[in-house]
Image (cartoon, grey):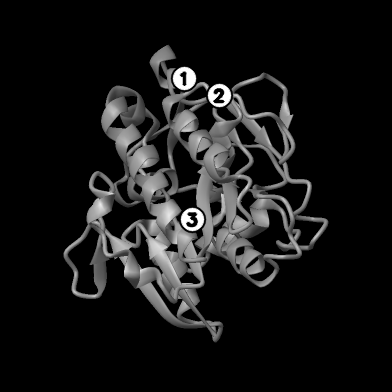
Amino acid sequence: MSKIAIIGSSGYIAKFLIEQLLRTDNFNEIIKIDKTSKDDVFYLDLLEPEKFDYNILNDVEFVIFTAAISSPDKCAEEFKLCWNINVIGTKYFIREALKRNCHVIFFSSDAVYGDIQSKRYDENSETKAHTSYGIMKKSIEDEFKNHNLFKSLRLSYVVSAKDKFVSYCLECIKENKVAEVFHPFYRNCIMLNDVFNAIIWIIQNWDLYQPFVLNVTGNELISRIQIADEINRVFSNRLIYKIVKPDEDFYKNRSQITQMISLYLKKYNILEQKTFSEKIQRELENIKL
């Protein structure tokens, strides 16, 4: 039985992780840490990380660090503010956690790689982040990658019924509106439940898994058009959409295509080997519109 802390506990991914963790028998306590005033949450402002009571972490075995300003546009437009949160404050917190022998699982991103057309990035690929958001995630990885209590999960686009794009499409169905689907925009999308399964595997196999980073990624390169078509497969073509080519500003802060693969997901049988179509249909099958 382990005690686990979730940093950024109010985020939609973190909320899902907490719900799933509470259903397991592996953890006797889950500590929620966030910039919120809820009674069951410990307050943390990453702009002032020195004010946090780190004694809370003294008997915590695993820290899952999900907190960040994740909007690529905001990271570019308000770089100093986001740097102070995503890098300065985050490094401060992680150092304090490592001092207390916590195992830290850090949520990173495929944005750390940069943008080389037709390149397939794996865990051994050099990171050449060019966007503000990617540079921030890379800075954390570079700082702690040699620490044996630190591991980074590089997430591709995480798909669920509540992710930004899918929820937008579902809302368009409800309101009978035409959805705008940006294209080209491709990622090796991963399902939210797969993120949880990867975390559980890392926790259970910390010493077995020697690399400091794991790419949490799907096998297929998926466009937003394909996601829209999968939604229509489930909801009987009720989603009406038009394909829109974003202006150049959209691609300043994000790559058109990031093809990320993993050397280890299949090797260690970390995730079930099903198609994206199978996984997203299972995710959406109980949604009522």
Of the numbered discs 3 and 1, the one sitting upstream in the chain is 3
Circle 3: residue type: Ser
Disc 3 versus disc 2: distance between alpha carbons? 21 Å
Disc 1 versus disc 2: distance between alpha carbons? 6 Å
Q: Report which residue position mark 3 lands on.
A: 160
Q: Residue furthest front?
A: 99
**Label 3: few (<14), some (14–19) or many (≥20) C-alpha neighbours in 10 Å:** some
Q: Report which residue position mark 1 lands on.
A: 251
Residue 25: x, y in percent? 54, 86
Between 131 and 55, the one nearer to me in the picture:
55
Between 165 and 116, the one nearer to me in the picture:
116
Question: Are the residues tagged 1 and 2 within 8 Å (C-beta)?
Answer: yes
Q: Residue furthest top?
A: 248
Mark 1, secondary structure of its residue: helix
Residue 162 seen anywhere in this rendered image of the structure? no
Residue 17: x, y in percent? 46, 67
Residue 162: x, y in percent? 40, 55
**Label 1: few (<14), some (14–19) or many (≥20) C-alpha neighbours in 10 Å:** some
- Is 186 above or below relative to 102? above
Residue drawn 66% across the image and 51% down it: 276
Circle 1: residue type: Tyr
Q: Report which residue position mark 2 lands on.
A: 256
**Label 2: few (<14), some (14–19) or many (≥20) C-alpha neighbours in 10 Å:** some
Q: Decide if residue 41 is on the left or right side of residue 240.
A: left
Q: Quadrant of residue 68?
A: top left
